[in-house]
Each structure stands twice: as C-alpha cells, then as structure tokens.
Amino acid sequence: MPKIYLRAGHGGTSPGTAGNGLVEKQETLKHVLALAGMLAEYEVELKLARTGDTTVSLSASIEEANRWGADLYYSSHVNGFTDSRALGYESYIYTAPSAGSIRAQNILHPRQAAVWVKWGSRDRGMKRANFAELRETAMPAILVEQGFITNPGDAGLLKQGSFINELTTATVQGLVELYGLKKKEGTGGEPAAKTGKYIAAAGDTLQKVADRYNLTVGDLKRLNPHLADGTLLAGDIVYVTLPGEVEKEYAALNRELLLCREKVREFRELGRQIQLLSQKLNE
Ligand SMILES: [Zn+2]
C-alpha cells in the first residue's frame, strides 16, 4: 500500500503567515485534515505530521517521513505577502528533483491549479526551490502554496467549504492517478454512495444535505455523532455512508477546529465592541 506523509505547514508556536482573519497554521491543518478524511476511503497508508495546533519542527517531520519510508512527502502551505494584490497557487519541488518529484508535480500541480483558476485566482506556476523539506527528504516531495492569505480574494476562497471540497477532491484525484489508489471495500450492507462524504458550505443545513443524498436528518445524525446537536458549520464533514472509527474521530476533531475558529471571531468582535464603548465613555 502506498505511504503518504502529510505535513500541515507550521503549527503551535509557528503560526506562519496571516491575513484577512486567517492564520496559515490553521488553514494548512484544515487542508491536510480534509485530504486525510477523503483519502480514508482509499487503500493508502497516511501519516500526519500533526493533527492539532502543535509545534512540530521541520527536521522532526523530515526525519519521521524518512524513517517511515514514505512514498510521498506532501507539505501544505499558504502564501502571504506585504502587497495584498499578490495572489494565486504555486507548487515547489527541489532544485535538483528526482524523477518521482517531477512526476508528482506534473500530476498534482495542474489539478490543484485548475481549481484556483476556475474560482477566479491564478496559477503562478510549477517552481523549484532549495527548501529543507524538499532537499532532505529521501522520497518524492512536493510543497504547495494554496493561495495568498493576504489577498482578499484568495482568503475568501479559503473560507469556503465548497472550494476546499473541490480542491481536496482534485488533490485526491491526482494521488489516485499517481499511485493507482483503489477505493476500500464498502462496509457490509451499506449502500455505496457517490462520494461518501460531503463538506458543508456556508448556509448549509443538515436538512439540505439530507435532501441532496435522499437521506433524513435522523440518518445523518446517526452516521455523524459529531453532528448530534443538529447544527452544521461551514467546513463540517458530513458522512453520507457509514464512516469508520478513524473517520469519526477525524470529523469530530475537524468540528472542534471549526468551533475554535468561531471563538476567535467572537473574541475579535467582543474586543471591537469594547473598544467602541470605551471610545463613547471617553467622549
Ligand atoms: Zn508556510
């Protein structure tokens, strides 16, 4: 079974870049968790550098991937720049790349870039760089920069569940082509759904998702213990077939991440209100 090592760039004490209410370390984790969730339906072994907001050094990730004997090292990042007009997607392999790295970029880049271009951003091209992650890894390695967090348009896309869903699907399709990944055998007696999983967009409700898949809200709650309270957040994972234990755990963690982000927004809003009130008091 192919082994894919997924690194969500930054984390913990290394936030990465930030802009438009987003922080890179949270976005990279979201992308990697979405990818891992979708790949859970395939015959593939995964190892994640981190599954939460923890500090994992580059050298620790590289060492782990090398020791594990990964077939691909996939590093997820989001770009940032002082000029907010900079936008678009780009990917990197090492300056003196192996044939495997070239092949990975040739297959993954066009698929991811196509999604960015389709949604109104741009393809900045297939690039090469002397990054430690690309140089020190003993297997094909690729680093992707998923848009510019500092660009309002790109950041707007990163906030949309349906965009992330499409980007993740494109990535999975690329990995399927790269490694000939096969879908896991369906669990006993469960109907084979077309996708198995839906990622909620802003404005979605359980009822809307249920209607889309000819299910009831009760079915969805049964399949998704993390949605038992009946609410649905943009970015929530909704399984429409019976998920495994790892998938369940993943969906629950993903929801926690979404709730944390909501809290950050609330804090910001409270801070803003307090500032306004204190200005009034001082008038
Ligand atoms: Zn980064």
Image (spheres, grey):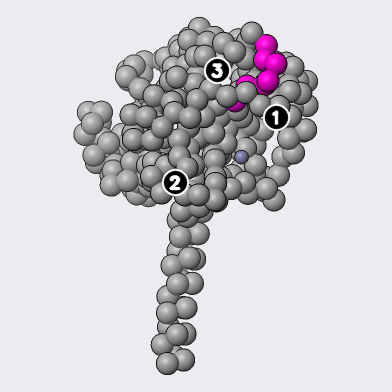
Which is nearer the eye, 14 or 209?
A: 14
Does the magenta-highlighted stretch encompass residue 93? yes
Task: Residue 131: give its label.
Answer: 1
Based on the displayed image, in which of its 4 quarters is residue 192 positioned?
top left
Above or below residue 235? Residue 39 is above
**Dot 3, how many residues are within 10 Å of its Cα: few (below 14), some (14-19), or many (20+)?**
many
Does the magenta-highlighted stretch encompass residue 251? no
Circle 3 is placed at which residue position? Answer: 105
Q: Amino acid at mark 3?
A: Gln
Residue mark closest to the camera, 2 vs 1: 2
Q: Residue at x 45, y 35 (%)?
A: 88
Is 229 situated left or right of 247 in this image? left
Q: Position of residue 132 (x, y in %)?
A: 74, 29
**In the rendered image, which quarter contains the N terminus?**
top right
Disc 3 from disc 1: Cα separation: 15 Å
Circle 2 is placed at which residue position? Answer: 85
Residue numbers of the magenta segment = 92-98
Quadrant hosting ligand 1:
top right
Q: Residue at x 45, y 64 (%)?
A: 266
The first of marks 2 and 1 along the sequence is: 2
